Structure formats: structure tokens, C-alpha cells
Amino acid sequence: QLFRSSPFFMAGRAVCADGTEARRYDAFCDLHRAALAISEIGQVRQVVSLDPPMLTSEFEVRAGAVPFLSDVLPFLRYSGGLPLTIEGSIVSSASIDTVNDDSYTLYMDTVEIKGSNVPLLRQVLDSGLRLESRNLGGLLEQNLPGYSNPKPLFRTTYVDDTMRICRDQDGKLFVYSKLSNATSTTDYSDVTADLGVGSLLSSLSLLI
């Protein structure tokens, strides 16, 4: 469950108390992973930058645009789907709040969808639509006594020039391999919003 190493899911876990609440959160994450069964997980990245200190998670997902053709056209017995896909990257960002010898605390910032290939929706998302998690948390702090914005702890237990091994507050293990020294997030501006039609036509041309 690599998605649990995103700032968003770590912040969700930090809201829960240890014990029963933590077990319920684990069960929720299991259900979330099961819900992703019809999708294909692509690249999963963590980008750590120092100026300003930020940790950004990029979680790329692909799913069938029409997963079950017979549900749409009942007279067809073919049980598969049309070869069109919905793609996008779930990007969650957090400030690195405090740094210790082998760990740091995160202050959740925003969640947004980048690189969507869905026409019209892409324009809406690129216009700046995103979940302002920190602002929402601030509103909850003002109106819910005892609530404070979560700041999850993320520990690095091993790092070298090729890989980084980290653990969340429950000790769950995440291993990332280093791809480059870049500290900028991925630019998805070249992703075409065509539901994968362009890629499909390119593949079909190879068969002719």
C-alpha cells in the first residue's frame, strides 16, 4: 500500500488514536486498496525539496474508461471493456515542519489531480481546483474543541545514493529507489486530454 506513504494518508492516520481507531484506519486503507483493484497503478514518486522544505507524493493511476461494455450495450456478450483509459496523478504535498536526526514531521498542505486525460475535466483541474487541506484543518481547529491539524512523523531508516527506506508512525515500511537529483515535481502539461485515443490509434497503426 504505497499510497499510505503520501502525506495525505499519513495525516489521516495521525488524526486517529492508537488502538481501535488505528485498526479502523487500517481497515479503511484495505478497503481503499481493494477499490483500486480495477485500476492499474503506475509510477509512484516522492519528491523531497529543501527550498522550501517540502515532501510531495505523486501517485499515477489508470483505469478503463468503459470498464464493462456489456453493461452499456447489453446485447453484446463481450465481458471486457473498451480500450480507452482514464489517467491522472494524485499529487499531495506537505511542508516539512520539523527535522530530527532520522525523521521529520509533515504539515499537510494540498491534494490535487494533475495530468488528467479526461476532456473538460482537465481544464477545470488545471485552473487551480484542489483540496486545501491545511486551510480546511484550520477551520476545524477554530470550530472543534480539542482538534489540531495532524503532523505525522516520517522516519528515514536507511538512505544512500540509490535508495531510501522509510517508516510511518506505525512502522510500516516503504522503499523508494532514486531516479534523479531533481527536486521539482513532474510536469504533466504534455499529457493529452483524449481518454487515451491517441495512444490507441498509435498502437493500431502498428498492426496495419
Image (cartoon, rainbow, N blue to C red):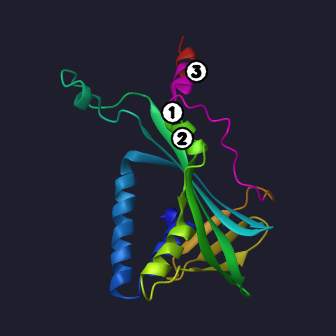
Coordinates of residue 205 in the picture (x, y in percent): 56, 15
Residue at image location 52% in from the left, 63% down from the top: 2
Q: Residue furthest left?
A: 75
Q: Is residue 38 magenta?
A: no
Callout 3: SS:
helix
Q: Is residue 28 left or right of residue 183?
A: left
**Disc 1 vs disc 2: Cβ atoms closer than 8 Å?**
yes
Question: Which residue was labeled with disc 1?
Answer: 120
Vertical placement of residue 200 versus 88, above or below:
above
User: From the viewer's perspective, is 126 left or right of 25?
Assistant: right
Q: In front: mark 3 or mark 1? A: 1
Q: Circle 3 sits on which residue?
A: 202
Magenta segment, prevailing SS (helix, strand or loop)? loop
Q: Which residues are magenta?
A: 183-201
Residue for point 53% across, 79% down: 149
Mark 2 residue element: helix
Kind of residue sitting beneath label 1 = Leu
On the question of residue 195 being in view, the answer is yes
Give the labeled residue for mark 2: 124
Residue 87 horizontal/vertical position (percent): 51, 41
